[in-house]
Amino acid sequence: MNIDELAQAARAALDEEYADYDPAIGHSRLEDDAIGEALTTDAVGITQTSADTATSPRHSSDWVTDWISQAACRTTGPDDLFVLGAAQNRAKAVCTGCPVRTECLGDALDNRIEFGVWGGMTERERRALLRRRPTVTSWRLLLETARREYERSAGILPLEDEDLTIILEQVM
């Protein structure tokens, strides 16, 4: 089964599953805390993993535009990532510890990718997140900024000159 056939099968299954779904209501099966936790984990949770990885020559806050070549799933077949039901949890496990998980999620959200697990989130989780945050114009920018702010507040990322100036002015 090629990727197009797999996507068509997934679309048909989702159409059947959501036949009674009313998009005007837009209810998510995820709790607000679960969505926030998933977004925070994707945005900042990998920084320690990627910083500790000897194979990662970049600083963890650097955004990787060619993330596919570094993805943990690059050797995984599409049949393992474009799944339904309980198999999605196994697919999400592939994303655990991936050094470019945030970049993958940002790309999927910015491009409104409908099928499969991307950045550790299922299509249902991504749709719920997009419905909850319709004003976000660039998920990449949002996630990149969140990761940088987290690293700076955690002392992982050095302060910029303007931040040091502000701190020194407050001390003096």
Image: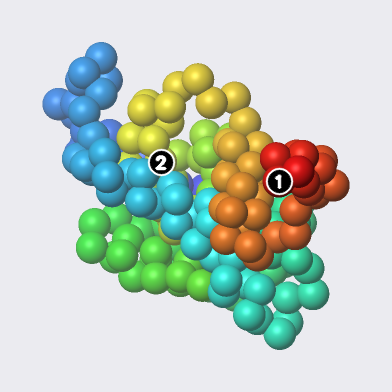
> Which residue is at the front of the view, 104 or 35?
35
Residue 126 is labelled as 2
Q: Residue furthest bottom?
A: 54
Residue denoted by label 1: 171
* Mark 1, other Cα within 10 Å: few <14 / some 14–19 / many ≥20: few
Say if 134 sits above or below 110 in the image. Answer: above
> Which residue is at the front of the view, 141 or 17?
141
Q: Are marks 2 and 1 in contact (CB under 8 Å)?
A: no
Residue type at mark 1 is Val
- The residue at 61%/47% (across/down) is 149
User: Residue 139, percent across and down?
Assistant: 58, 36
| Residue 104 appears anywhere in the view | no
Q: Secondary structure at mark 2?
A: helix
- The residue at 53%/26% (across/down) is 136
- The residue at 57%/45% (across/down) is 146
* Mark 2, other Cα within 10 Å: few <14 / some 14–19 / many ≥20: many
Q: Residue furthest front?
A: 172
